[in-house]
Amino acid sequence: MSSSAFQSAAGNAFTMKAGSILIREGDVGRCAYLLLSGRLQVIREKDGEIVVLGDIRPVDIVGELAIFDEMPRSATVVVMEDSYLIELSKFKLKALLHRSPTIAETIIKLLCNKLRESANRLVQISLE
């Protein structure tokens, strides 16, 4: 996905150090993030154990679910490698989706891909 496609929704660019928490499960989502470099990991805690839901790699978005469904954050996102990100404003991103069917389709494909990856991960876990 091209980072330039989201330029009009872009807010601050910033860096985060490995080991930092970008998103906490249960928090209100006011923005999403576009990862430009580094690596993030999406996790949840269940019965005192950490369950890895997925990795976020460069030029991927994280935090978009809480923007679109307006529910609390569904997972915690940990910075695994020093990372460079761009904040994507909730209101600007929604406006961009209304103006650009191409970007809306890109986001839908991204969400579908994440759903498939989650389903595959669940199958893997159940086979272990």
Image (spheres, rainbow, N blue to C red):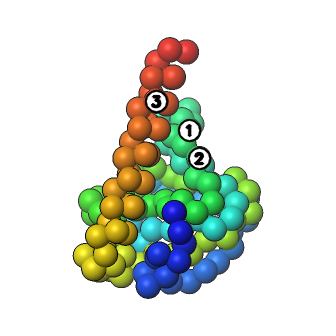
Residue displayed at 55% across by 15% down:
128
Image marks 3 and 2: residues in contact by CB distance under 8 Å = no
Q: Is residue 108 left or right of residue 18?
A: left
As measured in the structure, the alpha-carbon distance from the residue carrying label 2 to the one carrying label 1 is 8 Å
Q: Secondary structure at mark 3?
A: helix
Residue 46 appears at what percent x and percent y? 47, 34
Q: Which residue is mark 2?
A: 55
Mark 1 residue crowding within 10 angstroms, few (<14) / some (14–19) / many (20+) = some
Q: Count up the numbered dots.
A: 3
Residue 97 appears at what percent x and percent y? 30, 73
Image marks 2 and 1: residues in contact by CB distance under 8 Å = yes
Residue 28, can we see it?
no
Q: Secondary structure at mark 2?
A: strand
Which is closer to the viewer, label 3 or label 1?
3
Residue 10 appears at what percent x and percent y? 49, 81
Residue displayed at 73% across by 57% down:
81
Q: Is residue 36 above or below residue 73?
A: below
Amino acid carrying mark 1 in the image: Val
Q: Which residue is mark 3?
A: 120
Q: Secondary structure at mark 1?
A: strand
Q: Which mark is residue 52?
A: 1
Q: Is residue 111 above or below residue 36?
A: above
